[in-house]
Image: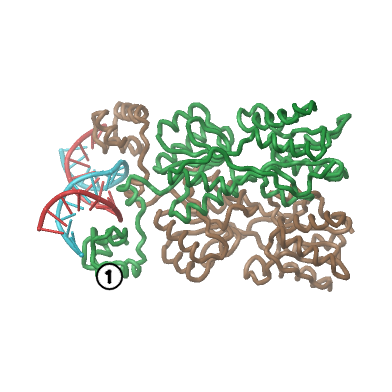
Chain colours: A green, B brown, C red, D cyan
Amino acid sequence: MTIKDIAKQAGVTPSTVSRVLNQSGGYSDKTRQKVLQIAAELHYQKNEAASNLVAQTSNVIGVLITNATTSFAAPIIDGIEDWAYQHGIRILLAHCGLNDAARLKACLDLMAGQKVSGILSISVQFDATNLALLKQLGLPLVSLGVKVDGYPTVAIDDEKAAYTGTKYLLNRGYRRIALAAIDPTDPQTGQARCHGYQRALQKTGLAPLIIPGDYSFQAGYQAAKQLWQAALPPEAIFAASDDAAAGIVFYAQSQGLAVPEQLAVLGFDNSYVADLVYPGLTTVEQPFAQMGQLAIEALVMKTPLPDQVAYQIKERHSVGWR
Amino acid sequence: MTIKDIAKQAGVTPSTVSRVLNQSGGYSDKTRQKVLQIAAELHYQKNEAASNLVAQTSNVIGVLITNATTSFAAPIIDGIEDWAYQHGIRILLAHCGLNDAARLKACLDLMAGQKVSGILSISVQFDATNLALLKQLGLPLVSLGVKVDGYPTVAIDDEKAAYTGTKYLLNRGYRRIALAAIDPTDPQTGQARCHGYQRALQKTGLAPLIIPGDYSFQAGYQAAKQLWQAALPPEAIFAASDDAAAGIVFYAQSQGLAVPEQLAVLGFDNSYVADLVYPGLTTVEQPFAQMGQLAIEALVMKTPLPDQVAYQIKERHSVGWR
DNA sequence: CTGAAAGCGCTTACAG
DNA sequence: CTGAAAGCGCTTACAG
């Protein structure tokens, strides 16, 4: 089922069929109708490979994620997908794992081979070698969440967001505030948030207390456990993610601690889980779906990206007043 | 950067370069080495579009999902992606929404145009028109979760699973058991689970009580609220999904009802959220990642599919004894 | 072991 | 308004 078949049936040449199907003009209304009708009858499907071959492009963008089970990946993917659907763009999905240079390289090769018109990477850290490879491939890339040197990024200002979150807790009367489940050695997100947290506390003379972790539920749970067994437990814990916040709330529930009366918990992300746990998480919201749309739009349309995306405190019930 | 360029530099013809790169044999060790070296130097990337055009296939499979934010989609996608990565298969992702025939058609057209070698659909219901289109396209498809007429399916036996879950509650001494947040008009999953639930109760003479809903957190919450305000509240609620179970637990917490002491909650899925809420959900586990791998393997390798996938009760703490 | 040629299905100047 | 021809980059019989 090719344009040749249609051409034969319609009594014209493939050139004409192509022109009609691409609406590039230069045909009579009569031929147009006949061609379209036959194409429909024959259930013609353009061979994109052939089309792409001559167009030297693909209308496909590569989406690179670490893995899909991360709670914030899903809304981003949804945001991207919706935009792509509306604009006739296809999405090639690839997982590159966490800090797996070999797999990341494989993903880049794959995307280069598929001649994607651009890459959208979600929270993917590039090592030097793969960064060089990326540059060398000459593919445009927009990064979501983390900074990739030399490429545009869509992200909130983590330092300010952590500052705002900490400030929020201070304003509500909390004094002993810990920051938990964060990776202070992570040169990007982790450090920035630690700084913001420390900056907010500095002015008050309160001592910062950071419990490192990997942003996970488990990390939150462990941090809460550790903090609660200390001589002087905190009044509030600022979690590095909603998953971690859920872990903290879980620990509190298991100990019969009332949230927020005995322990306030502030999350980060406003992901899926924030609504699911009891009490609902008050959290620093990142507009994931919107970030996904911004990123793909910038990538495809070459529109400029806003410097920073707006975050905000989404209030639920895990933080009260003290 | 094409095989022509490599050929020129290596002093051979494109045919030879192609043979070397595809390891199809028929070249001296010397040419092989030279070609490979030059290809590496030039950072050659095969144009997959051209290759696919002659091969008349693509090594791409289409993955069709309703939307990514559904809590069980992520582990399935992860399972598929890992398998695909190991086997050099690419994944074209498309969202077809929920019961959106127009969008589903667009997705099928897209996949046909991309000449995917097969389609993996995750919990996608096909209407008659799109089913006809699919047949007409001649693409192999494996469906996950729901039955698509005429195509292989990977799914648990919902009727039996619901029976087993209900039986589990009965064995633990619960008598007034409601089934909540389920769609009894859904010809597949919903009906099957209702039947299983009813069959288990039948033998005991207990009255079934089904609160319809759409499997969501909200549906669970509303069902719990409604049930709890009745004259004689249930002792246990069997939720149609873990999301719904989370909604039920949330309602219980908000009312100060102890789970499972005052209200037992049995979930369905063993998704991400089952571990997150307090208490952890006892739930009917579906092996999503494994289902994803089975499905893609069957699709690509044409291996036969097991008739049914094993489910099991995953015990946590939302069901006790009575 | 290697090359010349044809062809995959489409698009697009160029002629008329 | 339409056709004939060339070409996108690769693969693969066919010859030698």
Q: Label 1: few (<14), some or many (≥20) within 10 Å?
A: some
Residue B310 point in image, percent of width and height? 67, 55
Residue B239 point in image, percent of width and height? 75, 61
Q: Secondary structure at mark 1?
A: helix
The count of marks equals 1
Identify the residue shown where x is 35% and y is 50%: A49
Residue D14 point in image, percent of width and height? 20, 47
Asked where in the image residue A117 lies, by quadrant, the reply is top left
Identify the residue shown where x is 72% and y is 51%: A275
C4 versus A17 height, above or below: above
Closer to the camera in the image, B269 or C13: C13
Whether residue A306 is visible to the viewer of this picture, yes or no, is: yes
Q: In which quadrant will I find the N terminus of chain A?
A: bottom left
The residue tagged 1 is: A34
Residue A257 point in image, percent of width and height? 87, 43
- Left or right: B258 with respect to A44? right
Whether residue B320 is visible to the viewer of this picture, yes or no, is: no
B216 versus B273 height, above or below: below
- Left or right: A15 with respect to A269? left
Asked where in the image residue A179 lies, by quadrant, the reply is top right
Look at label 1 and name its amino acid: Lys
| Residue at mark 1: chain | A
- Left or right: A290 with respect to B263? left
A245 versus A194 height, above or below: below
Asked where in the image residue A29 lies, by quadrant, the reply is bottom left
- Left or right: A182 with respect to A42? right
Q: In which quadrant will I find the C terminus of chain A?
A: top right
